[in-house]
Image (cartoon, rainbow, N blue to C red):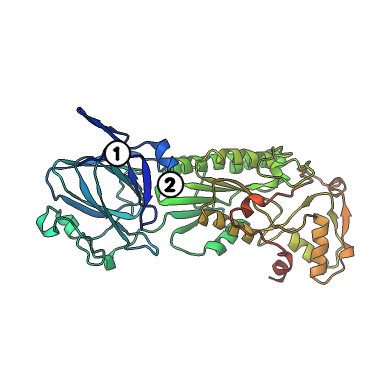
Amino acid sequence: MTEYGKQLGATETNIPGLIVFDLPVHGDSRGWFKENWQREKMTALGLADFGPVQNNISFNDAVGTTRGIHAEPWDKWVSVATGRIFGAWVDLREGPTFGAVYTTELDPSKAIFVPRGVGNSYQTLEPDTAYTYLVNDHWSPDAAYSFLNLADETAAIDWPIPLTDVEISAKDLAHPRLADVTPIPPRKILVLGANGQLGRALRAEYGDAPHIEYADRSTLDLAAPDLASARRWRDYGTIVNAAAYTKVDLAETPEGRKDAWAANVTGVAALARVATENGITLVHVSSDYVFDGTLDRFYREDDAIGPLGVYGQTKAAGDAIVSSVPRHYVVRTSWVIGEGSNFVRTMASLAERGIDPKVVDDQIGRLTFTDDIARGIRHLLDAEAPYGLYNLTGSDEPQSWADIARQVFKITGHDASRVTGVSTEDYFASASGPISPRPRNSVLELDKIVGTGYRPGEKRLTSYLAG
């Protein structure tokens, strides 16, 4: 008997992400009406905006019709249009809750959100039962499915009608026991720019877990017309874009300008389309170069941008594109130091070779090491921090490039006074090619990311040089 007059409400279960909803049903002598799926109201109760693309109905003539247990790599919104079912759900995802079981009855006044990888099954308790479900992906022979036997002894589902007395398909009868089930893996994480400084740090952070993939320009071309079908994108939960054009001065040349816009804007736009269409979280790395550096305080996430050069302009444009993706993190950083050739290594080499450098002393910022950026990105994803823009740098006291050079000299056992500070104008006075303008103040405020529980790196220079 359908229960009328309920208030819309959500109840979590023992299976993470499996949520039961009470649905208001309004009835009179003519019958009843309900909002079976109402995006705004459901998401207000905490349900993910899962983006259904298909609505299916399974009609069952007889009492006792039993179907399942099927786990697919997509989410479901399950409800009953007519009749009543006993439903059983088993977590078949990799992880600590693998094998967890939840059961309940559904009539038209209840629905359940079934997350990707949770096995779904039911038994009809009334004749002419119409079982309906919305899904956020289309069936594909290439998708990874998993199945569990309805009579599995470990799950030990207490079916209202014994399985020996009901209608079950031969295929469902042949499904494996829990010990032989292949778990549904987590959605994949794809790291782009995997061979760059940040890409290598992300490799070190994530390692070789089966659900982590790494790609560079040779294995995934963002300019390819078939990018939308280059992978089964619904299997991906996150794309980390660690690829970018970063040749700041070369970007001021005619060819460099084209390359910078192609990589930092056109390629990012293609990624944004893929992420939006497939419900993927897009992580994008931004730069202090989006600011003009004229503020007399640390830059916050909501400060107005004003890039001075082509590189900064392309990064600002890319940030704006990514901000339109429903699930996104823009990670803004500055003065990045990683593996390979960089400012710190160059200063250490000059110190060792007896060369006394002139270094800019009117640009102020903080070093950010790539392993800290990788750690921060992972933190935002693992903590499921609110989507949006986050500043992420080291937390040392702001310094000039000349100050940092003196530190490098001192740490490596050399006389810091060998470093001479000069203005930006004097430093580039003899340059033979175009020079991009630099922001004088590149210090980013870190309160927002610290508020998510992240601890920025500090005093990393000594350990970096020792490594």
* Mark 2 lies on residue: 230
Horizontal side of residue 318 vs 438, given as left or right: left
Q: Residues within 10 Å of mark 2 (few under 14, many from 20)?
A: few
The residue depicted at 36 percent of the width and 57 percent of the height is: 15
Can residue 194 be seen here? The reply is: no
Numbered tag placed on residue 459 in the rendering: none
Of badges 2 and 1, nearer the viewer stands 1
Q: Nearer the viewer, residue 381 or 100?
A: 100
State left or right for residue 247 relative to residue 60: right
**Whole-percent x and y of residue 162?**
13, 58
The outermost residue toward the top is: 30
Q: Is residue 285 or residue 18 the one in the foreground?
A: 18
Q: Quarter-wise, where is residue 83 in the image?
A: top left
* Observer-nearest of 418 and 160: 160
Q: Total of numbered circles in the picture?
A: 2
Residue 29: horizontal and vertical position, in percent?
A: 20, 28
Asked if 165 appears above or below 61 in the picture, the reply is: below
Q: What secondary structure is marked by label 2? A: loop
Horizontal placement of 382 versus 415: left or right? Answer: left
Nearer-N-terminus badge (2/1): 1
Q: Residue at x 79, y 65 (%)?
A: 408
Query: Can residue 369 be seen?
Result: yes
Amino acid under disc 2: Ala
Which residue does the numbered mark 1 point to in the structure image? Answer: 55
Going by the numbered disc 1, the residue's amino acid type is Asn
Q: Mark 2 and mark 1: span between their CA atoms?
A: 26 Å
- Image coordinates of residue 351 in percent, x first then y, are 82, 66
Tell me which corner region of the image, top left, top right, bottom left or bottom right, holds residue 97.
bottom left
Question: Which quarter of the figure is the N terminus placed in?
Answer: top left
Secondary structure beneath dot 1 equals: strand
- Residue placed most toward the observer, 115 or 129: 129
Quadrant occupied by the C terminus: bottom right
